[in-house]
Image (cartoon, rainbow, N blue to C red):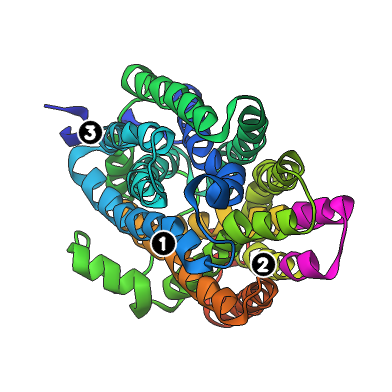
Amino acid sequence: MSPAHAAAPGDDYPQGIRANLQQFVWQAVQVFLVGLVLGMERTVLPVVAARDFGVPPSSFLYLLAFVIAFGLVKGALNFVAGRLSERIGRKAVLVLGWVAALPVPLLIGYAQSWWWIVGANLFLGVNQGLAWSMTVTSKVDITRAEQRGLATGVNEFAGYAAVGLAGLTTAWLAQRFGPREALLGFASVVIAIALLTALLFVRETLPWARAERQRHARGTHAGRRPRYAEGLAEHPSSRQVFAYVSWRHPTFSALCQAGVANKVADTLLWVLFPLYLHGRGLGLVQVGWVSGVYGISWGVSQLWTGPLSDRIGRRAPVVGGLWLLAAGVAACVLVHGFAAWLAAAAAMGVGMALLYPNLIAAVADIALPSWRSSALGTYRYWRDTGYAIGALVLGLVAQARGAIEPAFWVTAAWLLLAGAWVWARAEETHPARLRGERP
């Protein structure tokens, strides 16, 4: 019988970072590699779209088509990954994600038109939806409830630090070897390493989730007992989980809309911000530095923002992050100069760090282990569909006004309203804070 389907006694799979340190590290390595593949596009493609593929600078919707494709596919695959991993296991889904990435460098390297890039991002969306989802789910499986802020913080640190590093590295490689040659070589090496390490070193973690549920059922769970969301059966259908997390439960639905808002902002910073900076005289490497500072500050800051939520709860960091991100987005068009844009990028990175891992931790806090992966998949569906929503809305705004600046103001307002929604509708989810204890 495979590990994914083994009926494991609850005591055979202890939870905790220290008890599962080796697997925790390997999962962090995997998400670092996932982040490298995502980040390789962030500086190079938006700037060279017109030069190499004939995308007119004012055709914002055409330019953003690759993000729309990415967001729709990744969002859908997030939910599929969560549900599928409860049947065939986390590792199998992770490996499938890396297999799906194999065509990406070839499509980019030998692209004959911008639609080849759109096609590459369909495969990239599958990769991200399957592989990144499983690194999050696996870390949640093997850690205790009161460590999930730290666990998700480390996970998203590794992923988004890699996004920033990849953006800077590929900008330098593009200057030296050419943009498509740089992306072809960089992505091919990363994907090969990732697939090999996933096959050789990553363990299946589904038995940990099943053992956790058994301990709760027997009343032998050590540590704080979460207050799971009520109103859903022990083994619900896919449709029931999706509806419950999307809109039936007020806390889950508030967290989902916050996820959409943060990806609308990330779409702006992925595609339109580099164009905005390039149009104001920054060279490709300088744009890479600004994008890199945003990604690296986002990644590194999660090393303290995740543990912060383990101490003070999830809701305040999420709301504060949404509002700080809104302030940083507005600052992008209010300031001028390389140093000022670096500072705005750093502020936006910290804002993302405050909200990003703690939204994931909050969903994991109150979802039953038997359907937690599906709940995380539903949240991640809405969050990453935010890429497509953001690309469509911001593209239409920029297209209608013939300028990028209005898209910044729409994004800032969206983030402010999203923070207010979480503050008004979401309950605190940390198991200790629910009871007024000190975490």
Q: Amino acid at mark 1?
A: Ile
Pair 1/3: label in front: 1
Asked if labels 2 and 1 touch by Cβ distance under 8 angstroms, the answer is no
Which residue corresponds to the image point at 53% horizontal and 81% vertical from the top-left? 425
Q: Looking at numbered disc 3 in the image, what kind of residue is underneath it?
A: Ala
What residue sits right under mark 2 in the picture? 316
Residue 403 position, x and y percent, is 66, 73
User: Disc 2 on helix, strand or loop?
Assistant: helix
Badge 2 amino acid: Ala
Q: Earlier in the sequence, mark 2 or mark 3?
A: 3
Give the numbered dot on residue 68: 1
Figure check: 267 above or below 418: above
Residue, disc 3 = 8
**Residue 18 in sight in this render:** no
Vertical position of residue 420 compared to residue 20: above or below: below
Q: Which secondary structure dominates the residues rendered in magenta?
A: helix
- How would you rate the neighbour count of disc 2 (Cα within 10 Å): few for under 14, some for 14-19, many for 20 or more? some
Q: Residues within 10 Å of mark 3 (few under 14, many from 20)?
A: some
Residue bounds of the magenta highlight: 328-347
- Above-or-below relation of 293 to 189: below
Gap in Å between the C-alphas at discs 1 and 2?
Answer: 31 Å
Mark 1 secondary-structure assignment: helix
Q: Nearer the viewer, residue 182 or 354?
A: 182
Give the mark toward the camera: 2 or 3. 2
Give how far apart the Cα atoms at labels 2 and 3 are.
37 Å
Of the pair 380 and 211, the residue shown nearer to us: 380
Within 10 angstroms of label 1, few (less than 14), some, or many (20 or more) residues?
many
